Amino acid sequence: KSQSRKVRPTDQAGKVRNANIRCKICLEMLVHIVCWKYKADTTDEQRDDHIAKLRALPELIRNIESFEVGTDVLHLARSFDTGLVAKYPDRAALDFYNDHPEHQKVVALGREIAEKVVSVDFEI
């Protein structure tokens, strides 16, 4: 069965052109997004520790294509405090990440200090 994903051909300046071209030999990439709304009593030190442990995961877990962690800059009523956007080459890589013991340690910490955690995973 052939699967495809969007490729992003670039011109000589490196700019993306016609991002809708499909490549039949490539698999879909998976994007993993997670947001944390910390409890009111979560300290700055706990937040910083959580973020540092999140940022360390790509060094500990293989097959992560990209991994970004940041804090909210708008501070709107609907905003979450910290967000993560990661890309994986396929479902097996995302499953490996999700099940990895080092990831599970950071999951436990996030659940302990957050009042709410939301996530979405989708193909690109």
Image (cartoon, rainbow, N blue to C red):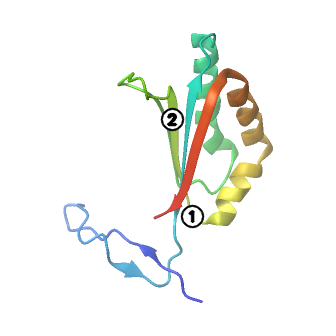
Quadrant of image for the N terminus: bottom right
Instruction: Give the mark nearest the N terminus, 1 or 2.
Output: 2
* Residue 69 disc label: none
Count residues near mark 1 (Cα–Cα under 10 Å), then give few for <14, some for 14-19, many for 20+: some
Quadrant of image for the C terminus: bottom left
Q: For the point 23% across and 61% down, which residue is it?
A: 15
Left or right: 24, with 34 as reference point? left
Count residues near mark 2 (Cα–Cα under 10 Å), then give few for <14, some for 14-19, many for 20+: some
Taking the view exactly as shown, the residue that stands out farthest to the front is: 77
Disc 1 target residue: 89
Q: Is residue 44 above or below residue 2?
A: above
Taking the view exactly as shown, the residue that stands out farthest to the bottom is: 1
Amino acid at dot 2: Gly
Q: Is residue 73 above or below residue 6?
A: above
Q: Position of residue 96 (x, y in %)?
A: 73, 56
Find numbered disc 2 in the image and state the secondary structure of the residue it sits on. strand
Q: Is residue 122 above or below residue 72?
A: below
Q: Position of residue 17 (x, y in %)?
A: 23, 68
Nearest the eye: 11 or 34: 34
Q: Residue 76's image quarter?
A: top left
Left or right: 63, with 15 as reference point? right
Amino acid at dot 1: Pro
Disc 2 target residue: 83
Q: Which callout, 1 or 2, points to the residue nearer the camera?
A: 2
Q: For the point 48% across and 79% down, which residue is it?
A: 4
Q: Position of residue 61 (x, y in %)?
A: 69, 48
Q: Position of residue 7 (x, y in %)?
A: 38, 71
Q: Is residue 98 above or below residue 90?
A: above
Find numbered disc 1 in the image and state the secondary structure of the residue it sits on. loop
Q: CA distance from mark 1 to mark 2?
A: 20 Å
Q: For the point 57% across and 12% down, which residue is it?
A: 44
